[in-house]
Amino acid sequence: MQVDRPPTQPDAPLLDTLPDISGFGGTCPRRTRVQIDLLMLAIEALDLKTSESLPNIAEELELQGVIQNRVTLWRLRSTNPLRRYGSQYSDLSQEQAKAMVVLTCYAARRLMVLTQQLIAVQEQLQRRNLPWESSFRLSEYLERFRAHFRSRMNPKRSAVVVYNTEEKLNNLALSLLGQLLFCTGAAGPQRLWFSLFDGEVA
């Protein structure tokens, strides 16, 4: 079963700021699908309230033509082949990906202050050679991210097996913080959109 691919939505002008990437037949490569879902996973780990309100945020942004409800969003995220049931939803159109990028960037902007604080704490702990557990807020984020990743990703996938230690999952979670901050500026959606295809276009 695959996610239905809706037509371009005239009521979602934000999507017009993101160009189609040629060479993929209107769909997205594997890396793009994985990265969008991981960024949303980091948002969930940062703030449960924000993650729960994503469908409402989509409505605020007039993206409901693509992301109608929570179930639709779950199906779109399940195009990530690393997920436990990702093989059921293997296709993600560029129109759907654009909507998810805009949604991700808007949610990341709401969490910008918290993200900046955690990155600052990370840098301080690294300079002092202290463990992440020295900061309650940072360790809480890392713990949530590890729990989300392990419960939602397929442990049989080779790309998931790579993250078989807490240290590797922590490093992934910390790198995603930097990427979320990358999304928060005025041109955040454009920067994220092009980065998702970087190296994919011949």
Image (tube, grey):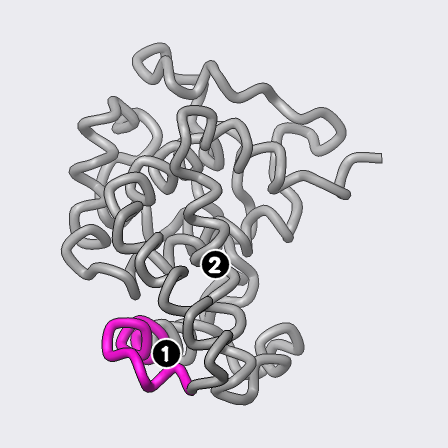
Overall secondary structure of the magenta section: helix
- For mark 1, give the secondary structure: helix
Residue 137 colored in magenta in the image: yes
Q: Amino acid at mark 1?
A: Ser
Question: How many labels sit on residues?
Answer: 2
- For mark 2, give the secondary structure: helix
Q: Relative to 76, is 177 above or below?
A: below
Q: Residue at x 46, y 67 (%)?
A: 123
Give the labeled residue for mark 1: 151
- The x, y position of residue 109, in whole percent, is 31, 39
- The x, y position of residue 114, in whole percent, is 26, 55
Q: Relative to 125, is 182 above or below?
A: above
C-alpha distance separating marks 2 and 1: 18 Å
Residue 34 colored in magenta in the image: no
Residue 50 image label: none
Q: Residue at x 62, y 39 (%)?
A: 195
Q: Residue at x 39, y 32 (%)?
A: 102
Residue 41 is left or right of residue 24, and the answer is: left
Kindly give the residue lying farthest to the right in the view shown. 202
Q: Residue at x 38, y 18 (%)?
A: 14
Q: Say which of 49 and 118 sits in front.
A: 118
Residue 20 is left or right of residue 113, and the answer is: right
The part of the chain drawn in magenta is 131-144
Residue 176 image label: 2
Q: Say which of 172 and 114 sits in front.
A: 114
Q: Nearer the viewer, mark 2 or mark 1?
A: 2
Q: Earlier in the sequence, mark 2 or mark 1?
A: 1
- The x, y position of residue 200, in whole percent, is 75, 42
Please state, as top left, top right, bottom left or bottom right, where the C terminus lies in the image.
top right
- The x, y position of residue 6, in whole percent, is 42, 27
